[in-house]
Image: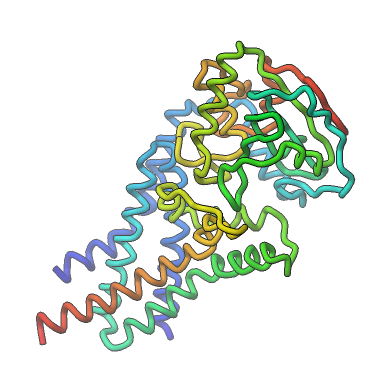
Amino acid sequence: MKNYLKRFWYAQKLLLPLFILVLLFSVGIVSGFSARNSIAGSYLSNLLTGKESTGSWAGVPNHIDLSEAKPGDILLAGNSSAAYGHFTHAGIIVDTNMLLEGYADCGIVLAPASRYRNYDWACLLRVQVSEPQQSAAVVYALAQQGKTFYPGAFKPNEQLWNCTKLIWSAYRQVGVDLDPNRDLWITPDALYQSPFVKVIASSGRQP
Amino acid sequence: MNGLLRISLRLFLMHIAMIIIIWLGGYFHPLEQIFAGYYIILLAVGGCCLTEQHPAQAPRLALLGGGISQIPGLLLALANLLSYNQILNVSSDWTYALLIWQTPFVPWLTNINYPVLKEIQFYFLALNFAWLIVVGCVFGSTITYQHITKHRWD
């Protein structure tokens, strides 16, 4: 018994690097090494230039008009000097004043939509699908409430979420792929670039 | 001292490897859950092997070695908790760094629905104290292994 435990313990020197190599290769194979403009590369290079993940808010609220917002709409917001891209956060409108979003310190939660005014800029998007599809996307998103946030969550995993993946996945369920880049991950900027969305309202600097 | 450094470094490197493995395993759900379980077994086996090598000092080495290997997690948790209580102002990068450090325990967090009581987010608390699992697991297994072997071979 003692020898088995020791052998198992010392075998890890070889096994753990082997697992890493096999998994790296498998993810590469399955994803087809096909991301055109991988987020990971631009994110890391932005971080190295001293930018923060979500940037820093200048303290002046934006004046995004939310009177047109309806369930299923997407609210994007961003701050200057962010490593993610122009927009750094995203939420899906689920009610007149509420949206569902993913936050690192509380997982997938409901929040007031007006909170998105506390960013340098914001943008309200509408996905060009039928109302039943929008409702189905909202129902799917609401079912993820309380689940875990993880910044590097891969698209296929339905246990780990981030703000943008929640929205992408909700619309994916109704047959719409909002990611034009087909990357392993998705950012708020990709939602903005999607050919399936239309800008309803915006405030502050836009891409 | 040499033994302490060795076990700390070993646990630290193992944690880094498991961060990468469990993150990549997340692409093939539920593989990340299996690897998270594997990590716990690995820590327990590490505690048993430590007991074999240093029978008298094993619990102390496990506590210290586990603690030293988790210093990054401890510092990140401290910064986040201080920021949560508005004593320190840190950017969200610190919370992301904590989440990445705690990757080996994130699959466990996904299986629990956390309540929010009077603004205390149990999700956030669980995230900040996940590093205790490493210390507890290695320390616990040394104590248990000592207890079992005493009863069997004494």
The outermost residue toward the left is B153
**Residue under the point 43% across and 86% down:** B1
In the image: residue B77, left or right of residue B7: right
In this figure, which colouring scheme has been used for the structure?
rainbow
Does residue A126 lie above or below A103 as drawn? above
Q: Report the front residue among A92 and A98.
A: A98
A134 lies left or right of A31: right
A23 left or right of B116 in image: left
- Residue B142 position within the rendered picture, expressed as x and y whole percent measured from the top left: 29, 77
* Residue A197 drawn at (x, y percent): 69, 18
The quarter of the displayed image where residue A122 is located: top right
Q: Position of residue A159 (x, y in %)?
A: 45, 40
For residue B8, say whether it is visible: yes
The residue nearer to you, when weighing B67 against A112, is A112
**Could you tell me how many numbered marks the image carries?**
0
Residue A81 against residue B77 in the figure, above or below: above
Residue A85 appears in the figure: no
In the picture, which quadrant includes the N terminus of chain A? bottom left
Residue drawn at 62 percent across, 24 percent down: A181
The residue positioned 47% from the left and 46% from the top of the image is B23
- Residue lying at 39% horizontally and 36% vertically, measured from the top left: B28
Q: Residue A111: x and y, percent?
A: 66, 41
Between B15 and B143, the one lying in front of the other is: B143
Quarter of the figure that contains the C terminus of chain A: top right
Q: Quadrant of residue B152?
A: bottom left
Quadrant housing residue A166 = top right
